[in-house]
Image (cartoon, rainbow, N blue to C red):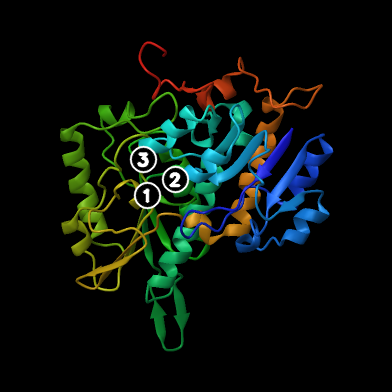
Amino acid sequence: MRIAILKESAPSETRVAATPDTVKKIVAAGHGVVVQAGAGVSASVPDGSFKAAGAEIAADGAITSADLVLKVRRPTQTEIAAMKPGAGLVALLDPYGERGGIDALAKAKIDALAMEFIPRISRAQSMDALSSQANLAGYRAVIEAAALYGRAFPMMMTAAGTIAAARVFIMGVGVAGLQAIATARRLGAVVSATDVRPATKEQVASLGAKFVAVEDEEFKQAETAAGYAKPMSAEYQAKQAALVSEHIAKQDIVITTALIPGRAAPVLVTEAQAKSMRPGSVVVDLAVAQGGNCPLSKPDELVETGGVKIMGFSNLPARLPADSSSLYARNFLALLPLLADKETKAFAPHWDDEIVQGAMLSRGGALVHPHFAPKSAA
């Protein structure tokens, strides 16, 4: 099949969906690759590198003849219109975002797979783009916090006196949170973390951080089968808020990472809690694209209140474009065998495979994912 790699059009998106290494492997597997001119420039991958790997470079029209289109972010209406009916699409489609975009995919008869919906099973770990990108986001969140913070991270003992280590509090211990803990520890900070999922307590401790949570019976049942946090009761939230409020007031940096798929991000740091921090402290909100874990945060804008800096990052992986592109490209490469006929190499998704079924958003002119399909179809 002919696979098109498009240049990303979303504002401030620096990633690309393939690398010369993955292009070389895709071509070796018997497929053709066409890369839109300039697609990898922002990720430090010139067109010449793609061409040397076996790809065709097209200034325009890369999408029109493609059997499968690969992107990082969801396509524009113009890109959807240019795709031929029956073509495949793989991207981070933001399915819970603006509904018109996914309806347009179904109307255009595009077989679209949302990388967000790759099942969290062991066989699909190498395809899990959410995890690969969140890992880099957690790392970068600490680097951004260090840049905003006006002091050093590690304790320093000098002839002129001692500098105390920064106190960093990570709220939400998923993939991003765990990497944030590890990075802050490597920089020498005193790190603590919280999450409503009981399984994270041991993970936090294994990284050398202190776990902060109200550990009652509700806490012990606060995780879904898919590994996500359950919404907590008002009573638990009140108890946790009291404990967290006392803790936040003593912190230098707070990094929030909590997201619930398909819902607004839960508020973890209230306005009062943010203002209780001392001047010069920093709050970094990784959930700002879904409303934010702090009501004061604004997407990609630095907000200051009482000397406390609050920064919401809507796309941290794009601040590490070379590495994030490399990992995303490998996620797709792992998925590719499930999208092609082994003998003919044609675009032929393995419809009965649980990974394809879990990720498939639209097929044959209809939305087929259980979260979006009409009830009768579901």
Q: Is residue 314 left or right of residue 269?
A: right
Along the line of sight, the residue nearer the viewer: 345 or 288: 345
Mark 2 surroundings: few (<14), some (14-19) or many (≥20) residues within 10 A: many
The residue under label 3 is which amino acid type? Glu
Residue topped by disc 2? 204
What is the spatial separation of the Cα atoms under label 3 and label 2, in whole angstroms? 35 Å
Query: Mark 3 — residue?
Result: 98
In this view, 32 is above or below 362: below
Q: Earlier in the sequence, mark 2 or mark 1?
A: 1
Mark found first going from the N terminus, 3 or 2: 3
Q: Nearer the viewer, mark 1 or mark 3?
A: 3
Q: Earlier in the sequence, mark 1 or mark 3?
A: 3
Q: Amino acid at mark 1?
A: Ala
Residue at 43% across / 23% down in the picture?
Answer: 225
Vertical arrangement, residue 271 with respect to residue 267, above or below? below
Could you say whether the residue bearing mark 2 is in a helix, strand or loop?
Answer: helix
Determine the CA span between mark 2 and mark 1. Answer: 7 Å
Q: Nearer the viewer, residue 16 or 285?
A: 16
Decide which of 272, 339 is in the foreground and name it: 339
Q: Check the picture and name the quadrant holding the N terminus.
A: top right
- Horizontal side of 1 relative to 61 (left or right) equals right
| Whether label 2 touches label 1, CB < 8 Å | yes
Classify the position of the C terminus by image quarter. Answer: top left
Task: Name which residue type carries label 2.
Answer: Val
Name which residue lies at 60% across and 27% down.
Answer: 122
Residue for point 44% across, 48% down: 177
Q: Quadrant of residue 351?
A: top right
Image mark for residue 193: 1
Decide which of 346, 59 is in the foreground and name it: 59
- Res 341 quadrant in image: top right
